[in-house]
Every structure is written in structure tokens, then in C-alpha cells.
Amino acid sequence: MRETILAAKLKKLSADLSIRHKLFIAFLLLNFIPLALIGTLTYQKSNALIQEKTNDYTSDLLSEVSKNIELNLREINRLYYAIFTNPEVRRALVQANTGQLSMVDYLTLANQVSQILYAAVIDREDIEAVHLVSLHGDVFQTGDKPFSPPLNMADWDRIMNNKGNLIWVNPVHDPLLLVGGSSIYDVDNLKKIGYFILDYKRNALYDDYKHIPGQLFIIDQNGQTISGGHEEKGEIRPGLPSRNRIIKGGGQGSFAETVDGRRLIIVYRQIKDTGWKLVSVIPAENYSLQSTILKKWMLVIFLSVFVLAIMLAYYTSNSISRPIRQLSAMMKNVERGRLDVSFHYNSRNEIGILSRNFNRMIMRISYLINQVYQEELLKQRSQLKTLMLQINPHFLFNTLETMNWLARIQGAPDVGKLSKMLGDLMREAIKGKEMVTLDREITNVGKYVYIQKYRYADRFDIDIDMHPDTLKTIVPPFILQPLIENAIVHGLNMKPGKGRVEIRGRFQGDDLVLTVSDDGPGIEPSRLSEIQSALSRLPDNFETGIGLMNVHQRIQLHYGKSYGLSVRSAPGSGTIVQITLPRDK
């Protein structure tokens, strides 16, 4: 209740404010709102752009680092292929798989394979050792360190079930080494002949990105840290949910996360052929320094512009409201009925235009008052004339009815029937209906034909063939009678002997098509061209009587330019006039 009363008071206070104060507030708001909106959006957009550019820069760095790591791992893959395709290596593993090597033979083979392995990795400081294990359990390796890779059963299962490509395993109990392993197949018969185990130094991965500022580390497909696991002071690493999000993400991406009250921007990129992902963690406060500077400058600019807007709003509202107040006082005089006033403001601005338009309006109002008075008189006279004209058709209709009954009394039924038919046609015309059913239109046609047969002494026959489904269609009245009249007067009247007029009605798709055809002498091509041109252009002065043009114009007024009449004819072949109407209307 209190809120409603307060709103009503504020509304009344706003309505009672002077135009000068309203303009001042309006100009102030129109300056303040866009300024605040633009400033806020600009700050947000700039802050977003700073973060976006930083993310793009970080993504580019991750791309370069991942390419370096991928290059090193491809070199290891080539070393792996070079080793297991070496004939001596394959021969040693095949012999060891027989299980029949003596100690001397084993030591001889081990020495030979060790030299091959040593030659392959002598220039690789990132490789700790290489081991080849036969299916029988014999081991060939570089160095004298006993073979004891820190692998659990799940890791061994992955390597044993591998089909030949080198895979990487992250031993959780060894913080110094990563293991690359694979099953070895004989290239000649594709039979498994042993296993390849490579111990890779974790710090070799760190060497590829240690020069990059920020917090970077690598995780495997299980979310475990592969490299960069020793967190430095102040570093914060994302938790398990974020690591799962990174694992399930695509080849690269970024997102924000809050860890221990600090907002972090996490950018990651996949290292090809490994399932590993290189991750960068950027504290959000790294973005805030530039944003803070931008915010201070925008605040100074906003305050300066706001003060300037206050001064501008006061000056503008006062300069606009003064002549408007004067014009308002002038309008009150007009409200009291004084039309002899005028307002003069010598300026070409909007107020000057308003003053001149006000003066013209006063003159126009005076003129229109007199004009409306005259038009009202003319309207009353026109209505009276219309009422008078309606008396004549009624009088004629009543006279025809009298003639009908008089003819029947005096024994002239044909004359009475003619009077009755003509009276019925006059009744239809007097009703002035805009639309009738097609069967009603056919009934009127029958009355008209009955009259015309007496006039032309049975010089023609009428054949009406309407599809039953068409008879309930709504059509404009008197669209067939003028066409039949044209067929009789201009067609059959010029033909020696008895003529014939055919009236047809059919549905064609979504259209109702009515045709009136005669077997008269037809129309000359030049005249037919004039008629067809007139139907397409509807000229005001075309001399075709009230028949074709009247029906054509009425149909197009009802239904549009797509409907109306068309005429086909040839000398000696009669004439066909087609009416096209919409089926559903």
C-alpha cells in the first residue's frame, strides 16, 4: 500500500514538473545513461580482450612447447623402429624365445644387442636405459643396471596387449622416469617376439618448457601429473574436477576455476600421439593490473563528461523551454476561441519552424471550419438525392407488377410473364447484394434469356451446363447477364439463321471457370487485340459499353488482378468469354 502511494506521488510530481525541469532531467539522463552504459561495456570488453589476448598468447606458447615435445617423442619413435627392425636384434629375440640358449650363447647375444642399443642411444641424454625382453624372459639392455622397471600389472598388461606402436606409461612410484613400451613383432611373419621398454627422464620434458614464464605442467590421460609435479611456492594446481574437464575436453581449450579463493584461468593443449595434455595456469589477478589502470582513466573521463553534461543540459533545457512556454500561452488563447492570434519567433531552428507552423495551423483551422460547414451541407443534399433516386426503381418495379396482373386479367399471360420476369430482375438490382450464389445467378440468367427470346423471336438457343458442385459457390451478381447480352447482340444478331449460346461452369484446381460462348461470326483480329489490351490495362475511355469492362473491373475489385475475363475469338469461329474466379471465395 505504501509503495502504491509513493508511486502515485512520484507520478504526480513528475507530471507537475515544469517543462524546463523535465528537459533538464531528460538531457541529463540521456547523457548519463549512454555514458555509463558505454563506459561499462567498454571496460568489460577491454577486460575481456586483455584476457582473450593473454589466452591466445598462452595458447601459442603451449603450441610451440607441444611441438617441441612431439618432435622429441617422434625421435624416440624412430629410435624404437630402428631397434626392433634391426636383423641382429630380431635374431637374438627369436633365439632367446627357444629357451635353449646356454649361458655362453646368452652372454654373447646380450653383448651384441647391448652394443646395438648403446649405439642407438649414445647421443640421447634424455634416455636413461633401453630394455628388450624376450617371451622366455631373457633381457637385453644398455648398461649394467638390473632390469626392474617401476610398472604395475595394469601397465604391463597395456604393453603386452599393444600391437606394435610405442605407448607411454606414467609410473606413479618413480618420480624420475617415464616408461615407453610396446610389444615387438617380427617384420617377416608378424609374430610377437618380445617387448621393448625405454626409461625416459622426466626432467627432459621439463627442459622443453622451463623457460616459459608461468605455471605449466603435463598430465596423462588419467589426470596424473607427468612433468612439473614439484609445486613451487605460491603455485596453485587445479583439482581433480578440473583435470577431468581437461581430459574430456578437445585438443585444446580454456576455462576459469576458483581454487582456494583464487580465480585461475586454465589453458590446455594436447600433445599428439600420447594422450598427454600440456596445461598452463594463470592467476586472474595477472589480468587485473591493466584493468585497474583502464578503470581509473575511464572514471576520470566519466566524471569530467558528466559535469559537462550537467552544464549543457541546463543551458539546452532553458533555451528550448522559454519559447515553448510562450507558445503554450498563445495556445491557451486559441483554446478560448481566439483565432486571430499569431506567434513570431525569428529563427530557422525547430522552434522557429514550430511557430510558423502554428500560425499556418490557425489559418488552416479557420479555413477548415468554413469548409467542413460547406461539405456537411453538400453531404446532406447528396443523401437526399440518393433517397430520391431509390424511389424510381421501386416505382418502376411496382408498375411492372401492376402490368403483370393486368395482363393476366385481360388474357395476355405472355405479356404478364414478361413483366414478371423484368420485375424480378429489377428486384435483384434493387437489393444491391454484393455477392450471390452461382445457382441464384443462373436463375437470373434464365429470366433474362426468357425476355430476350421474345425480343429476338427465338433466333437463338441457350445451353446451360453447370457442374453441381459449383452451384453453391459465392460470386458477384450480374456477371453472366452482360456477357450473354454481348453474345446475342454482337454475335448472334449478326448471324443469319438461328444461333446458339453455351454457358459452362467447372472447377479447375483452385479456380472456378465460367465460359459464355456463341457460334456467331467471331471478332476481327484487330478488334480482338483492342479488347484484350483494354482488359489488361483497364482504360477509362475504352468503348465497349458497360458489359465486359464492368464485369472485369468488379471481379478484380473483389479478388485482385489475378482474376477476371479473357476473350478468345476468330472470324467465322464464334467467340468464347471466360470468367476466372477463386474457388474458395
Image (cartoon, rainbow, N blue to C red):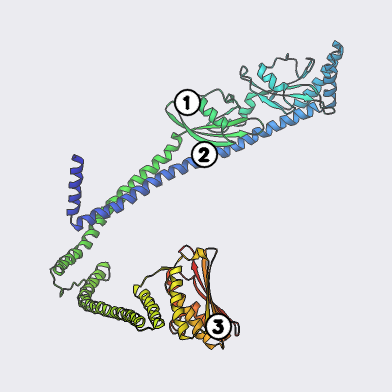
Task: Report whether residue 140 is seen.
Answer: yes
Looking at the image, the residue that sits furthest to the top is 103
Report the front residue among 526 and 322.
526
Query: Closer to us: mark 2 or mark 1?
Result: 2
Pinpoint residue 296: horizontal percent, then vertical percent.
36, 43
Distance from disc 2 to disc 1, alpha carbons, whole Å, reads 21 Å
Task: Look at the picture and state if 56 lies above or below 337.
Answer: above
Residue 206 on image: x %, y %: 61, 28
For the residue pair 308 and 373, the one nearer the viewer reads as 373
Label drawn at residue 196 = none
Q: CA distance from mark 2 to mark 3?
A: 94 Å
Give the labeled residue for mark 1: 234
Determine which residue is flagged by label 2. Answer: 55
Q: Which residue is mark 3?
A: 499
Hey, what amino acid is under mark 3? Gly
Query: Looking at the picture, does residue 434 appear above or below residue 489?
Result: above
Is 2 left, or right, of 49 in this rendering? left
Which part of the image, by quadrant, shows the C terminus? bottom left
Q: Residue at x 72, y 29 (%)?
A: 76
Image marks 2 and 3: residues in contact by CB distance under 8 Å: no
For label 2, the crowd category at 10 Å Cα-Cα, with few meaning under 14, some 14 to 19 and many 20 or more, is many
Mark 1 or mark 3: whose residue is earlier in sequence: 1
| Residue at image location 82% in from the left, 26% down from the top | 186
Q: Could you tell me residue 258's position as x and y percent?
A: 45, 30
Amino acid type for the residue under numbered disc 1: Gly
Q: Quadrant of residue 402?
A: bottom left
Of the two numbered discs 2 and 3 on the same chain, state the one appearing first in sequence: 2
- Mark 2 or mark 1: whose residue is earlier in sequence: 2
Q: Position of residue 319 (x, y in %)?
A: 22, 62
How many neighbours does mark 1 have within 10 angstroms: few (below 14), some (14-19), or many (20 or more)?
Answer: few
Q: Residues within 10 Å of mark 3 (few under 14, many from 20)?
A: many
